[in-house]
């Protein structure tokens, strides 16, 4: 699995050529037709995330490690908020900018290249931060969470979807997942009102997606071939992870 910006650039370049991969993800995860996801947050999970973010018209959402910006743009459409999307893949950011224009949301969307632990945004400049299935890629999870706290205004909220190892000593599970412990890390980064909830129903949908990916004929489609490789890897250690939704606020 790639974890560098250059690796993600290649991954996004392949993905744009693959309507099959996008159709599969959208259908099995139950996502709205316009939403371009490169993660595993499904339609029901997105509804919970929107409720947890509780954004109002004109407020600012940071979609951190936003990829093609699918979730941030959908939330902007639903809530009337503005979205700032940050990702270290310049290719993903280019795709997100084009998508915002196609959806008529360019005047409420600002996509820029930046890091999980260094967004380039001002202190206390956003009302909410969303990280969908990406915080595990941060070299230092704590530095990424501290960056979320820095850019949030007092009372602002962070919402994170991720996975955690059931057993941090299980080295069959990727190290980046074994390093996740949001119930401990969010308070260490200065957050209050921390809640980390298990999401077994989301996990069942993920399982269905990986299984169906393996039944398709990938032929010369590099995005599908890469999805199948990931499916084999993920299914081999599937029972070692739990799916979590974490929410927390910045003290006033
Ligand atoms: C699984 S994708 C999720 C993308 C998007 N959040 C979504 O749900 O569609 C993980 C994303 O994290 C980004 N990423 C990984 N490490 C990063 C880092 N250190 N700083 C910024 N972005 C990073 C990748 O480029 C990729 O877009």
Image: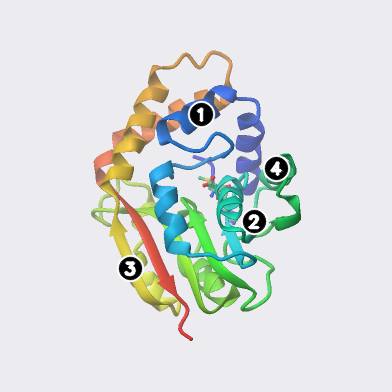
Q: Residue at x 60, y 54 (%)?
A: 76
Residue at disc 4, secondary structure: helix
Residue 94: image quadrant is top right
- Decide which of 13, 64 is in the foreground and name it: 64
Q: CA distance from mark 1 to mark 4?
A: 17 Å
Q: Residue at x 55, y 34 (%)?
A: 33
Which residue corresponds to mark 1? Answer: 226
- Decide which of 240, 204 is in the foreground and name it: 204
Which residue corresponds to mark 4? Answer: 91
Residue 85: assigned label: 2
Query: Few, some or many C-alpha atoms within 10 Å of disc 2 (few <14, some 14-19, many ≥20)?
Result: many
- Mark nearest the camera among 1 and 4 is 4
Q: Residue at x 52, y 24 (%)?
A: 224
Sequence-first tag of 3 and 4: 4
Asked if the residues shown at circle 2 and circle 3 are in contact, with their CB atoms under 8 angstroms apart, the answer is no
Asked if the residues shown at circle 2 and circle 1 are in contact, with their CB atoms under 8 angstroms apart, the answer is no
- Compared to 36, does 186 lie above or below? below
Q: CA distance from mark 2 to mark 3?
A: 24 Å
- Mark nearest the camera among 2 and 4 is 2
Sequence-first tag of 3 and 1: 3
- Mark nearest the camera among 3 and 4 is 3
Q: Residue at x 53, y 64 (%)?
A: 55
Q: Is residue 149 left or right of residue 197?
A: right
Which residue corresponds to mark 3? Answer: 195
Q: Is residue 130 left or right of residue 246?
A: right
Q: How many marks?
A: 4
Sequence-first tag of 2 and 4: 2
Residue at disc 2, secondary structure: strand
Sequence-first tag of 2 and 3: 2
Measuring from the top left, give residue 210's x and y in whole percent.
38, 30
Q: CA distance from mark 3 to mark 1?
A: 34 Å
- Mark nearest the camera among 3 and 1 is 3
């Amino acid at each position: 699995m790639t974890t560098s910006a250059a690796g993600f650039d290649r991954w996004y370049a392949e993905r744009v050529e693959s309507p099959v991969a996008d159709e599969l993800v959208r259908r099995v995860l139950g996502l709205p037709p316009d939403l371009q996801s490169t993660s595993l947050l499904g339609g029901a999970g997105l509804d919970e995330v929107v409720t947890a973010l509780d954004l109002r018209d004109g407020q600012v959402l940071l979609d951190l490690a936003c990829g093609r910006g699918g979730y941030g743009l959908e939330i902007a459409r639903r809530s009337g908020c503005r979205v700032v999307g940050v990702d270290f893949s310049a290719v993903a950011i280019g795709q997100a900018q084009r998508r915002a224009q196609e959806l008529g949301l360019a005047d409420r969307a600002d996509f820029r290249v930046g890091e999980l632990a260094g967004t380039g945004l001002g202190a206390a400049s956003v009302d909410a931060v969303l990280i969908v299935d990406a915080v595990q890629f941060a070299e230092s999870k704590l530095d990424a969470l501290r960056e979320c706290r820095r850019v949030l205004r007092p009372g602002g909220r962070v919402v994170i979807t991720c996975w955690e190892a059931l057993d941090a000593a299980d080295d069959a599970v990727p190290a980046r997942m074994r390093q996740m412990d949001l119930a401990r890390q969010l308070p260490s980064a200065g957050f209050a009102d921390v809640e980390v909830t298990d999401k077994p129903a989301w996990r069942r949908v993920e399982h269905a997606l990986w299984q169906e990916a393996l039944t398709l004929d990938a032929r010369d489609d590099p995005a599908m071939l890469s999805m199948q490789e990931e499916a084999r890897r993920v299914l081999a250690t599937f029972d070692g992870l739990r799916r979590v939704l974490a929410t927390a606020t910045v003290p006033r």
